[in-house]
Amino acid sequence: MAKHWADFQYEIYLNGLTGAVPRLPTDLTRLEELAEHRLGPGPVGYVAGSAGDGSTARANRAALDRWRIVPRMLRDVHARDLSVEVLGRPLAAPLALAPVGVLSIMHPEAEPAAARAAAAQGVPYILSSASSTPMEQVAEAMGDAERWFQLYWPKDREVARSFLARAKAAGYGALFVTLDTPLLSWRPRDLDRAYLPFLHGVGTANYFSDPAFRAGLAKPVHEDPNAAVMHFVGMFSDPAKSWPDLAFLRENWDGPIVLKGVLHPDDARLAADAGMDGVVVSNHGGRQVAGAVAAADALPRVAAAVGDRLTVLFDSGVRTGDDVFKALALGARAVLLGRPYVYGLGLDGQAGVEHVVRCLLAELDLTLALSGHAGPATPGPADLVESPV
């Protein structure tokens, strides 16, 4: 029988007989406030920060809250199974840990701790190219567990080519290319503190360890770290990229390619026409465009446009198991979870990330069952109603 993620609640209750309670809240919406209290406003402010006045981040939550689940009764849900197939890979649940960079500002074990947690719980880990740890070390921490690589597509083609070759050699099975960062957005929480971690050399490990990147430096990184940082800043993103450039990715990556940051159905169609394998309906958690469409509002249109041609994934605003249910019902194959696991990492390292994953999937398992579903494939639009604002 497949593992019932909901068993985690009984584990908690049984531990309570000996006086033990969870080290972290089981309501994941509380983690940000707790992390800021324990870690301070600096690191948490960078993770939690949004574009402009935060309107898009708020819209993400409001859009998910607006959809209400309509439970069905007397359906056999005793033999539940949350497993799905995503990008040709069998997964234990419709969840992956989203790519989040610069994790060393939250915990000294950074990406390896998050990766080990994902491996322990059987969910894929998507490593950000802006990680604090080289991709090879993160891969080593995961063993044979499913891992995917996210690319911030740099201007320098040789660096991009080198990244893809390294990721393939290190066992990353799919490529996620973030499209929504040709420039960094206006982020007042960071601007008010005049803080960008990359200028301090944080989140540059993959670049500083890359032979193609180092070939462009006049001196080794350790001899002139400031010059290395400026070289990184100059190539990190490329606002000149356009759809024909996707051919470069296909030429240099023979596995699945997923485009992250797609909100318009026409862009999703262009992705399919270009031979991509999937899209992530995402507004970068509200970090890039203030006043943008909520990701959950964009999801049904994208799924309707390309759901029969591409794997449609979702992120931005997910905090609860019912959020995941709603995303599945609106057309997503699986969901990427970002900020909550980062707060868990900051609060309790690997154990904190595992706690977040187990809480989310236990709540999803229960939400599915209590709504009349034995697995993630059956929820659909008929299981939701849109409540008035």
Image (cartoon, rainbow, N blue to C red):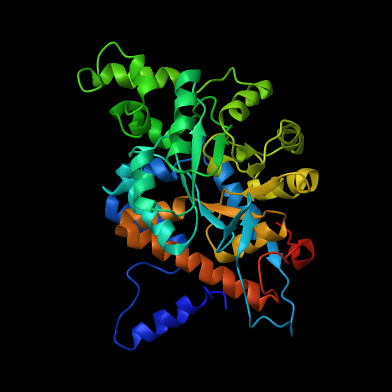
Can residue 107 be seen at all in this image of the molecule?
yes
Q: Please, which residue is most extreme toward the left here?
A: 223
Q: Position of 251 compared to 272: left or right?
A: left
Can residue 156 be seen at all in this image of the molecule?
no
Q: Identify the residue at image location x=71%, y=77%.
A: 372
Snapshot quadrant of residue 258: top right
Q: Position of residue 189 (x, y in %)?
A: 41, 37
Which part of the image, by quadrant, shows the C terminus? bottom right
Q: Position of residue 297 (x, y in %)?
A: 70, 48
Up-down relation of residue 22 to residue 146 (above or below):
below
Q: Identify the residue at image location x=58%, y=42%.
A: 56
Compare residues 64 and 160 and report the one nearer the observer. Answer: 160
Q: Please, which residue is most extreme toward the top here?
A: 218
Q: Identify the residue at image location x=34%, y=89%.
A: 17
Snapshot quadrant of residue 270: top right
Compare residues 360 and 298 and report the one nearer the observer. Answer: 360
- In this figure, what is the number of numbered marks? 0
Up-down relation of residue 200 to residue 264 (above or below):
above
Q: Position of 271 compared to 316: left or right?
A: right
